[in-house]
Amino acid sequence: MIDRICKEVGDSSHSSVKTLVLDNCKSSKIEGLGDFSSLTALSVVNVGLTTLDGFPPFANLKKLNLSDNRIRDGLENLSCPKLEQLKMSNNKVSTLDSLKPLTTLGCLKSVDLFNCPVCDIEEYRNSVFQMLPTLKILDGADVNGEEVDSSDDEEENDDDENDYSADSLSEEEVGLDYLKRNDLEDDEEDVTFEANGHEASEDEEEDSEESSVDNAEDSLLNESSHKRSHSDAFEPEDGSQDQKKK
């Protein structure tokens, strides 16, 4: 297993590796993983494991695949507080008691024990769901026995890791300026305001237009009348012209 680890990691620092796949490398026990402190996903499928003794604590591990091995018990060695998905199909787990250490994993959402002898126990599914209150999926099916696509489960876990989604954004965060601009443009096109700031009705607008026309006509008439009066005031009478000539 150590040789396989060196091949997979190469010159990378062990503490920086987040995903490690050691499938099909032959070893009866876990070894050489103590320095992988940042590991979030580990796959050790078809290795020949018979025990989990020496399994190091992983503070950040979320996905662990131990399928196709010969593990009977020893789940108390899984010190992974953030573990969400555990795959142990086709192992030698045969009793419900051997699963009790999983109760310490408070984030566990999905467990796969398919083709393990424990699956043949009467009321196996109900017992496991009662034992693990955070569990949502057991052997690919939910508590009601309805099958769940594994890709859907992984997408759900990925969504939980996001701080926010597009649906959670408010108007203040998305397009608020755009909405304000549109509202202002609509107001300018559809609404007329009087000088005092009150919204004018359609009747008031028509009255205002008619009043403006009437005022303009009155102004023209007054101006014409004023010009005639002014001209009359300075035009000499017929008699006055004759007197000046004399």
Image (spheres, helix red, strand yellow):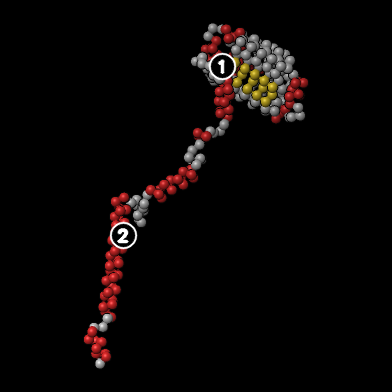
- How many residues crowd around disc 2 within 10 Å: few (fewer than 14), some, or many (20 or more)? few
Amino acid, disc 2: Ser
Asked where in the image residue 37 lies, by quadrant, the reply is top right
Q: How many marks?
A: 2
Q: Is residue 144 left or right of residue 6?
A: left
- In this view, the residue in front, 123 or 141, is 141
Residue 51 in view (yes/no) = no
In three-dimensional space, the C-alpha distance between marks 1 and 2, rounded to whole angstroms, equals 80 Å
Q: Is residue 34 above or below residue 219?
A: above
Label 2: element kind: helix
On-image quarter of the N terminus: top right
Residue 129 in view (yes/no) = yes
Q: Is residue 28 above or below residue 82?
A: above
- In this view, the residue in front, 12 or 34, is 12
Residue 105 appears at what percent x and percent y?
59, 20
Residue 110 appears at what percent x and percent y?
57, 19
- Dot 1 or dot 2: first in sequence order is 1
Amino acid, disc 1: Gly
What residue do we see at 50% from left, 33% from top? 167
Residue identifier under label 1: 140
Residue identifier under label 2: 212
Q: Is residue 195 left or right of residue 56?
A: left
What residue do we see at 50% from left, 36% from top? 169
Q: Is residue 27 left or right of residue 165?
A: right
